[in-house]
Image (tube, rainbow, N blue to C red):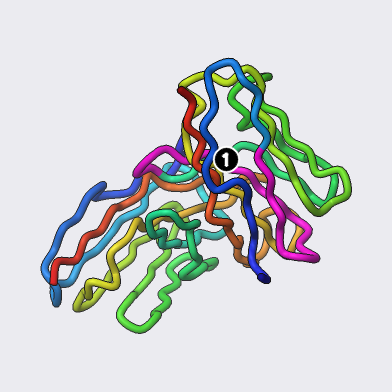
Amino acid sequence: GAGVSQSPRYKVAKRGQDVALRCDPISGHVSLFWYQQALGQGPEFLTYFQNEAQLDKSGLPSDRFFAERPEGSVSTLKIQRTQQEDSAVYLCASSLSPGTKGVQPQHFGDGTRLSIL
Amino acid sequence: TQLLEQSPQFLSIQEGENLTVYCNSSSVFSSLQWYRQEPGEGPVLLVTVVTGGEVKKLKRLTFQFGDARKDSSLHITAAQPGDTGLYLCAGASGNQFYFGTGTSLTVIP
């Protein structure tokens, strides 16, 4: 399809395991955002890429969280040594324009629901 | 940290009623966006407002951006069950988008 695709849709892992979440943005979109969303709450910003450059990672909760977008398209969010508090929905969004200036909308994927046992 | 506070957090109304959702902040934003999110899906953009005092209408939905660009409101006229969902405001600052705390709306047939 032409939208943002995230995989897997659901991920269950044991505490202490590493997980990797994938985001395929809309082709040609410059900006890519990762968010963490708790049930019934608004998404919280994790990190932002402009093409392959990670320009802002101030929202990553700890050094166990790592994101990359090596070729400026597909992005991966990795969480090492997972903890129960990492359980959440992780959303990816892409936007045509760089940064947050202007009025280009963010297009969201349907998220990955991560459950840490 | 969520800079944008929404109220109410939960709203349950009968079909045909009107409602208003508020989005408030102490920070100034260059633009504010409103999204609607349904269970198991990502948020979908409804509107972007960029000018202080701006009013935009989208069928039964009316969006307003405060004069000081710190707050916004969403008014729904004659709500329908299809309006049920989580409504989110979002503002841009630097390289980040800050989302509001969310308003969960249920419209009962």
Residue toward you, A75 or B25: A75
Q: Residues within 10 Å of mark 1 (few under 14, many from 20)?
A: many
Instruction: Please give the range of residues in magenta.
Output: A21-41
The amino acid beneath tag 1 is Phe
User: Height in image: A82 above or below B18?
Assistant: above
The picture places residue B60, in percent across and down from the top left corner, at: 30, 80
The picture places residue A102, in percent across and down from the top left corner, at: 67, 64
The picture places residue A109, in percent across and down from the top left corner, at: 58, 56
Residue toward you, B47 or A110: A110
Residue drawn at point x = 71 percent, y = 55 percent:
A24
**The C terminus of chain A sits in image quarter:** top left
Residue drawn at point x = 43 percent, y = 68 percent:
B53
Task: Left or right? Give the position of A42 relative to A99.
Answer: left
Residue B70 among magenta residues: no
Task: Left or right? Give the position of A42 relative to A77.
Answer: left
Numbered label tally: 1
The picture places residue B25, in percent across and down from the top left corner, at: 41, 45
Residue projecting furthest to the right: A71
**Residue B87 quadrant:** bottom left
User: Height in image: B57 above or below A69?
Assistant: below
Q: Which residue is mark 1?
A: A45
**Residue B55 quadrant:** bottom left
Residue drawn at point x = 78 percent, y = 38 percent:
A68
Label 1: state its secondary structure.
strand
Residue toward you, B39 or A107: B39
Host chain of mark 1: A
**Residue B64 quadrant:** bottom left
**The N terminus of chain A sits in image quarter:** bottom right
Residue projecting furthest to the bottom: B59
User: Height in image: B48 above or below A46?
Assistant: below
Residue drawn at point x = 55 percent, y = 60 percent:
B31
Task: Left or right? Give the position of B12 relative to B27.
Answer: left
